[in-house]
Amino acid sequence: MMKRKSYRRLWTVVILLCFISAMNPTSVGAFSDQIIQKGATGDDVVELQARLQYNGFYDGTIDGVFGWQTYWSVKEFQEEFGLEVDGFVGTDMKTMLEKATEYDKEFVHRMLNEGRKFTYYGGVDKNIQKGPVGSKEKPIPPAEKPSPEARKEAPAPKQPQPEAPPEDPAAEETPAEKPPETPDEAPAPEEPSPSPEVDVPAPAEEEPVPQDDDINIEKAINVPEGYSDNDIRIMAQAVYGEARGEPYVGQVAVAAVILNRVESSTFPNTASDVIFEPRAFTAVADGQIWMDPDETSRKAVIDAINGQDPTGHALYYFNPVTATSDWIWSRPQIKQIGKHIFCK
């Protein structure tokens, strides 16, 4: 008899959990395994900004670009949730964000693709938070943010708020925002009618000028498969900080050393971890890693990823003029490129 009661209780709990899950569906995010940091772009940053905005830490535009506003929002979140306050979004912070927020990826990306200015605060009806199509540059009232006391609370089921009346995009247009009249719409000056034998071609319809979408979450075009735009960015920063005065082949060589270390079993297995390994690169120690890289540095990284390795599989390099370590001089040398000697 006792066993039957225990089974009944167990099944009751299982059914209840299934019911709760059905009533509170949550969208699973798609954070990659890479550390997200200032300067990164792409889907990881879109999700980061959306989750930070969900519980009120970020009130900027969700645009997929990790700038200063996102950086300070990350540090504020880390401080309030007892994480290491370093501005880097690693595994611990991603886990905490997933526990403390919800992420509707389909909604957020649809808003971006439709060119809407929108917000993403938890517990607020999404129909209220989205602006009309093409409203990225139009300010819309921000949704009410949760109080600081409520930020740490995991999301609870919310009763939908009364739906606001649908917004009329036409009513919000100002004369400055309306498209200029096309030649077909503008009043044509009176001209003598052409003679019947003259065939006058109809004016060609103007091609719509493609809008320059400054919110570009696909900046990682031409990035080789298996590498995120965040990988390319941090490697370009390292190349720029370490070798911006070197010839182009020397910049490719520095990028190749980073990749060789990723492939080596004696080093970490991601570009970020290799670069930020303690005492690994001078540019990290002196802060030059945070300088904005140029396009040449990015191109050097992509060439290295695509297989160019002018170093002959080197794992180390040093400047013989400035090197003070006896150990680095003991490494078997392969060749010198520019000012750097590359070693095994």
Image (cartoon, helix red, strand yellow):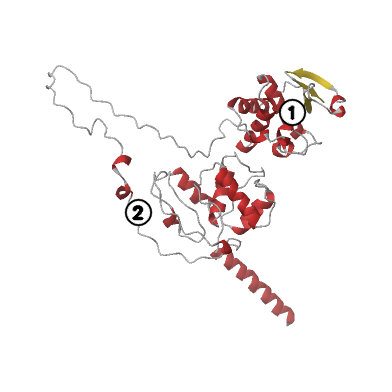
Q: Name above or below for residue 81 compared with residue 241.
A: below
Closer to the chain start, of discs 1 and 2, is 2
Which is more toward the observer, 144 or 298? 144
- Asked where in the image residue 194 lies, by quadrant, the reply is top left
Q: How many marks?
A: 2
Q: Quadrant of the C terminus?
A: top right
Query: Residue tagged by mark 2?
Result: 167
Q: Quadrant of residue 165?
A: bottom left
Q: Which residue is mark 1?
A: 257
Is residue 308 among what the camera can see? no
Is disc 1 placed on a helix, strand or loop? helix
Residue 206 can be seen, yes or no: yes
Q: Position of residue 50 (x, y in %)?
A: 54, 51
Q: Nearer the viewer, residue 32 or 89?
A: 89
Q: Give x and y (percent) for residue 135.
A: 39, 45
The amino acid type of the residue labelled 2 equals Glu
Residue 272 spot, x, y in % from top left: 70, 38
